[in-house]
Image (cartoon, helix red, strand yellow):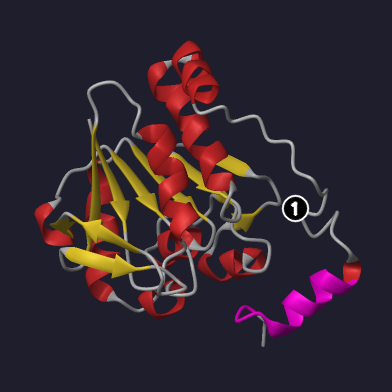
């Protein structure tokens, strides 16, 4: 089994690394980071680079596709090289997945039309533009498409898919060994729970303000 995790300039690191830590523990699986061109790819702060071991053109039939989000997603919405690759990879993939605004890239490629999907809460309504049905759920599975909400939810998505592919006990073992037992010091992880002034502040500054 081959797992292809897509990278692009200004991706969000945890969007890619969260699923990597979960899905990378699939038995007998090969995990590859891929980008339009092989080599280092910088994250959204520019302070971290992950290495794309292979170019998109060199990975033609992954079993699992993982698309992260991040500020760099916006210019990628018109990157025909990436969108064409997503369509081609999806044609033979067993699972096509995304984290955060990565779902907008799947949607822009026409893969989520008529399907339930999620994204970062600031970007959620934009899924409608591409014929998807946005939900506020943390992880959404619709057929072979598994989308996760913002950033940290990629860990949940990876663990969910791990259970589907390798079985509940294997997923539980990975959860235990990674000591994934969230106990956050604040209960402000969604717009429904966070202080209203913070929600409005980030909405007003978002690149996803609907016009």
Q: Residues within 10 Å of mark 1 (few under 14, many from 20)?
A: few
Q: Picture coordinates of residue 198 (x, y %)? A: 82, 71
- Element under disc 1: loop
Relative to 112, residue 10 above or below:
below
Figure label count:
1
* Corner quadrant of residue 165: top left
Q: Nearer the viewer, residue 42 or 104?
A: 42
Query: Considering depth in this image, is 179 or 163 the residue closer to the camera?
Result: 179
- Residue at far left of view: 58
In the rendered image, which residue does mark 1 sit on? 189
- In the image, taking residue 202 as reference, residue 36 lies left or right, namely left
32, above or below 94, in the image: below
Residue at 12%, 60% in the rendered image:
57
Please state if 85 lies on the left or on the right of 198 as rendered: left
Give the magenta part as a residue range: 197-208
Quarter of the picture holding the C terminus: bottom right
Q: In the image, residue 35 lies at what x, y percent?
A: 23, 63
Identify the residue at horizontal 15%, vertical 63% (top origin): 38
Q: Position of residue 14 (x, y in %)?
A: 48, 53
Which is the main secondary structure of the residues drawn in magenta? helix
Q: Residue at point 56% right, 58% down?
A: 132
Check the picture and name the quadrant holding the N terminus. Answer: top left
Instruction: Decide whether residue 71 is among the magenta residues.
Output: no
- Residue 155 x/y as whole percent: 53, 40
Q: Is residue 204 rendered magenta in the image?
A: yes
């Amino acid at each position: 089994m081959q797992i292809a995790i897509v990278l692009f300039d200004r991706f969000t690191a945890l969007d890619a690394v969260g699923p990597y830590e979960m899905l990378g523990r699939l038995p007998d699986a090969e995990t590859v980071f891929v980008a339009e061109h092989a080599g280092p790819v910088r994250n959204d702060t520019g302070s971290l680079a992950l290495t794309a071991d292979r170019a998109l053109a060199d990975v033609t039939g992954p079993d699992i596709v993982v698309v992260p989000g991040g500020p760099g997603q916006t210019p990628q919405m018109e990157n025909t090289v990436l969108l064409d690759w997503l369509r081609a990879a999806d044609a033979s993939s067993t699972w096509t997945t995304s984290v955060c605004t990565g779902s907008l890239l799947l949607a822009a490629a026409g893969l989520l039309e008529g399907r339930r999907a999620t994204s970062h809460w600031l970007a959620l309504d934009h899924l409608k533009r591409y014929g998807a049905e946005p939900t506020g759920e943390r992880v959404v599975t619709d057929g072979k498409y598994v989308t996760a909400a913002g950033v940290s939810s990629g860990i949940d998505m990876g663990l969910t898919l791990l259970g589907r592919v390798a079985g509940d006990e294997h997923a539980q073992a990975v959860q235990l060994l990674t000591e994934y037992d969230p106990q956050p010091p604040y209960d402000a992880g969604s717009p429904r729970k966070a202080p209203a002034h913070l929600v409005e502040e980030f909405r007003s500054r978002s690149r996803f303000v609907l016009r």
